[in-house]
């Protein structure tokens, strides 16, 4: 029987997201071991979005972080992080917000991504108006095709921005999220082949800029490759809680699934059909079924999903009853966390506290 069943859930209102603090600490320690040192680890906080977890990471020796939103960046400033990369192109009013962030949290060094000259000109102009300066990472697209500038255009962008007095290029950011095959040998070959040009680019930029250039690379799937083969800062995020999808696909990474959802059967339609209170608002729903992996439950097939409901079918009759509580691991934990205002926290088989998911909001104060 799974260890989660050693905990009394009888008074738990559902749906709920529950986190085991001890397993979170285990995952932090293991990530540091895989990276080799804190110097080579820049974890992404988009998975947890929780101040207390950020403080656990800092207490474990991690000082550099990556995030996607200004709220996440501010959470890290509150936590006392030393170095934060906002891994997102900053556009429009967000430029002002980032400059305000830099001013409010002077003990934290904030940097963000740049991938085009037009944005660079607007940022330079805004910095001129405010008497500010910023450091940026060039966002490199080496195949993900989501954000970033193509490799062969990076040198042009760097040379075009070199005369700017308020923007300093300090590194390259390369997220290779398209490389996610389950087979480690295939993933390693694909990742290393795709990354060769990025390494060459760093060498070229050192010559152009006459200074060292840092590289922040990868996510959880390519963490196994970059940590072993490349001199970079690795930036996995999902490792902090892990989930069923990554546990299935990336078994060489021995992180523990530290988050579980609790749900109840709210209706029994017939002896083979059941409805749970785990709708789109409670579990990530962007992928095809299955959305969750039940713990120690009979064989159940997920067949329908709406805002407040998840419909199950069973082969055997009467395997569940109305009111029954079930536990399950999310297949995609990152957007699942963002659906909850709070997570319930356990340690050594006991509920100990709750943590606010403070950065699920678009804004904290800035």
Image: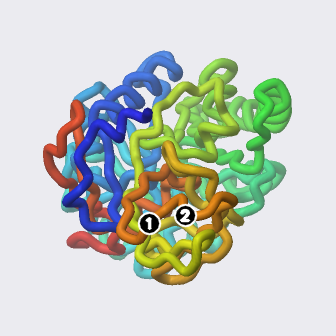
Q: How far, Cα to Cα, is label 2 from label 1?
A: 7 Å
Q: Is residue 222 visible?
A: yes
Q: Are marks 2 and 1 in contact (CB under 8 Å)?
A: yes
The residue under label 2 is: 318
Is 33 in front, or is 7? 7
Query: From the viewer's perspective, is 286 left or right of 106?
Result: right
- Asked which quadrant contains residue 361, the reply is bottom left
- Asked which quadrant contains residue 93, the reply is bottom left
The image shows residue 77 at horizontal and vertical percentages of 24, 52
Which residue is painted at 52% across and 54% down in the image? 330
Assign a secondary structure to mark 1: loop
Residue 294 vs 88, above or below: the answer is above
Residue 221 vs 130, above or below: the answer is above
| Quadrant (top left, top right, bottom left, bottom right) of the N terminus | top left
Is 162 in front, or is 65? 65
Is 124 in front, or is 5? 5
Query: From the viewer's perspective, is 268 left or right of 99?
Result: right
- Asked which quadrant contains residue 337, the reply is bottom left
The image shows residue 121 at horizontal and vertical percentages of 56, 71
Colour mapping: rainbow
As drawn, the label of residue 356 is none
Residue 326 vs 235, above or below: the answer is below
Residue furthest toward the left?
Answer: 352
Residue 264 vs 275, above or below: the answer is above
The image shows residue 272 at horizontal and vertical percentages of 62, 69
Which residue is painted at 59% across and 27% down in the image? 253
Which residue is painted at 14% across and 49% down in the image? 353
Residue density around tag 2, few if under 14, some if 14–19, many if 20 or more, within 10 Å: few
The image shows residue 341 at horizontal and vertical percentages of 28, 68
The residue under label 1 is: 321
């Amino acid at each position: 029987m799974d260890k989660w069943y050693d905990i009394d859930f009888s008074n738990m209102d559902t749906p709920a997201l529950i986190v085991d603090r001890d397993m979170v600490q285990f995952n932090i320690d293991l990530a540091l071991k895989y990276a080799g040192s804190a110097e080579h680890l820049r974890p992404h906080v988009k998975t947890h979005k929780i101040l207390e977890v950020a403080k656990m990471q800092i207490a474990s020796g991690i000082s550099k972080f990556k995030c996607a939103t200004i709220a996440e960046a501010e959470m890290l400033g509150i936590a006392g992080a030393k170095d934060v990369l906002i891994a997102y192109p900053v556009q429009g009013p967000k430029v002002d917000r980032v400059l305000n962030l830099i001013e409010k949290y002077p003990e934290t060094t904030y940097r963000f991504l740049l991938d085009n000259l037009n944005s660079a000109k607007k940022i330079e102009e805004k910095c001129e108006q405010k008497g500010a300066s910023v450091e940026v990472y060039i966002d490199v697209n080496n195949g993900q095709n989501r954000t970033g500038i193509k490799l062969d255009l990076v040198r042009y962008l760097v040379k075009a921005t070199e005369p700017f007095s308020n923007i300093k290029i300090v590194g390259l950011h390369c997220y290779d999220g398209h490389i996610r095959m389950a087979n480690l040998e295939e993933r390693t070959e694909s990742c290393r082949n795709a990354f060769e040009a990025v390494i060459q680019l760093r060498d070229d930029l050192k010559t152009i800029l006459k200074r060292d250039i840092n590289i922040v690379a990868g996510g959880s799937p390519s963490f196994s490759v970059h940590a072993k083969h490349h001199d970079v800062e690795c930036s996995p995020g999902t490792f902090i809680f892990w989930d069923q999808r990554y546990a299935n696909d990336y078994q060489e990474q021995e992180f523990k699934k530290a988050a579980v959802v609790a749900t109840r059967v709210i209706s029994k339609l017939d002896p083979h059909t059941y409805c749970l209170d785990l709708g789109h608002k409670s579990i990530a729903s962007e992928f095809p079924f299955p959305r969750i992996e039940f713990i120690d439950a009979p064989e159940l097939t997920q067949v329908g999903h709406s805002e407040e409901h998840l419909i199950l079918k069973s082969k055997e009759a009467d395997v569940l009853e109305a009111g029954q509580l079930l536990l399950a691991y999310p297949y995609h934990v990152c957007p699942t966390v963002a659906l909850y205002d709070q997570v319930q926290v356990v340690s050594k088989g006991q509920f100990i506290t709750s943590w606010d998911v403070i950065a699920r909001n678009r804004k904290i104060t800035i």
